[in-house]
């Protein structure tokens, strides 16, 4: 069985899960790259770590169709937007890539909630 073919999930939920896991990867990479670059990157690191945790939780709750998945998806979308706003302020490739991934994740979370 291929995990992307889980039949109990609709397409919007599956997209949200996939994008959340991608956001986790992008945020962990961005936070790691930004760490050690002083105070100017501290907010980026903090927000990326927050999103990595929230997005992982969002994906897990969506997978099990939790009663809380919509609330967590809303929090994830908001966190993704805040982190993307921060990342877009930095010229580093990892920050720009992270921001792009986070915008897609926020959109997927909101679509899943609709």
Image (tube, helix red, strand yellow):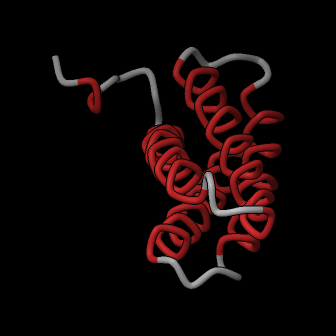
Residue 68 vs 110, above or below: the answer is above
Point out the residue furthest to the left here.
1
Q: Nearer the viewer, residue 5 or 105?
A: 105
The residue under the point 73% across, 62% down is: 38
The residue under the point 35% across, 23% down is: 7
Residue 84 vs 78, above or below: the answer is below
Q: Nearer the viewer, residue 40 or 9?
A: 40
The residue under the point 46% across, 70% down is: 97
In the shown orientation, is residue 12 left or right of residue 38? left
In the shown orientation, is residue 97 left or right of residue 62? left
Instruction: Specify the quadrant that holds the N terminus.
Output: top left
Residue 16 in the image: state x and y as whole percent.
53, 45
The residue under the point 64% across, 21% down is: 61
Residue 109 in the image: state x and y as whole percent.
65, 50
Residue 79 in the image: state x and y as whole percent.
78, 52
Find residue 36 and report its image quarter: bottom right
Q: Nearer the viewer, residue 70 or 51?
A: 51
In the shown orientation, is residue 42 left or right of residue 37? right
Residue 48 in the image: state x and y as whole percent.
66, 50
Count numbered badges in the picture: 0
């Amino acid at each position: 069985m291929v995990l992307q073919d889980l039949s109990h999930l609709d397409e919007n939920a599956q997209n949200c899960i996939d994008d959340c896991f991608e956001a986790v990867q992008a945020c962990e990479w961005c936070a790691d790259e930004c760490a050690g670059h002083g105070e100017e990157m501290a907010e980026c690191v903090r927000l990326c770590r927050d999103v990595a945790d929230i997005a992982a939780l969002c994906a897990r709750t969506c997978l099990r169709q939790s009663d809380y998945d919509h609330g967590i998806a809303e929090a994830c979308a908001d966190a993704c937007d805040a982190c993307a706003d921060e990342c877009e302020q930095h010229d580093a490739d990892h920050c720009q890539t992270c921001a792009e991934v986070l915008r897609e994740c926020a959109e997927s979370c909101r679509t899943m909630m609709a």
